[in-house]
Amino acid sequence: MTTTPKDLDDIFEALGNQHRREIIYILSLQPHSISQLAFKRNLSLPAIHKHIKVLKDAGLIIDKKIGRTHFLTINRQALRGLQEWLMQYHTYWGNDKETLTNYEYHLTKKVVKGGEKK
């Protein structure tokens, strides 16, 4: 699965809310029904449905209807796409001090070329 910039925008927007991040955490442990999620998060059914819609539109959760009950689980494929995007920067991370020290060295590096300091 290739994660497009639009997919990432939707994922980051969905995860920008604490309730939705907590829903993702709960669903990462095991599937839940919508009413179970509402109870655990102390949210009304209309409120939980709004959060679920955002998460589904972002592709972060999957639902399955069994009888009259909708069960939800996380979409691990979408989370893998997010992880792949994030990990592309891993080689550049280092620690904060190293990063700033390297940048400072780059800015203050003096190269003598043709008698001029650069």
Image: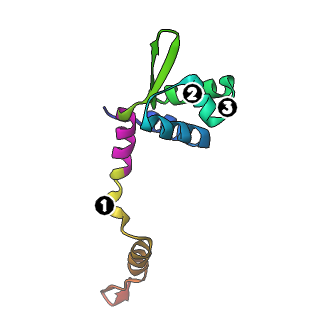
* Residue that numbered label 2 is attached to: 36
Q: Look at the image and give the residue range highlighted in magenta.
A: 77-86
Residue 42 horizontal/vertical position (percent): 67, 34
8 horizontally vs 92: left or right: right
Q: Which amino acid does label 1 sit on?
A: Thr
Nearest the eye: 71 or 75 = 71
Residue 92 image-quadrant placement: bottom left
Which residue is outermost to the bottom? 115
Q: Earlier in the sequence, mark 2 or mark 3?
A: 2
Residue 16 horizontal/vertical position (percent): 57, 43
56 in relation to 4, above or below:
above
Distance Cα–Cα, label 2 vs label 1: 41 Å
117 in relation to 55, above or below:
below
| Quadrant that contains the N terminus | top left
* Residue that numbered label 3 is attached to: 43
One can see residue 51 in this view: no
Identified at 55% across, 41% down, the residue is 22
Residue 3 horizontal/vertical position (percent): 37, 35
Dominant secondary structure (helix, strand or loop) of the stretch shown in magenta: helix
Please count the marks in the image.
3
Q: Which mark is residue 72?
A: none
Judge whether residue 99 is colored magenta: no
Query: Element under label 1?
Result: helix
CB contact under 8 Å: marks 2 and 3 = no
- CA neighbours of label 1 inside 10 A, class few (<14), some (14 to 19), many (20+): few
85 in relation to 90, above or below:
above
* Residue that numbered label 1 is attached to: 91
One can see residue 16 in this view: yes
Identified at 33% across, 85% down, the residue is 111
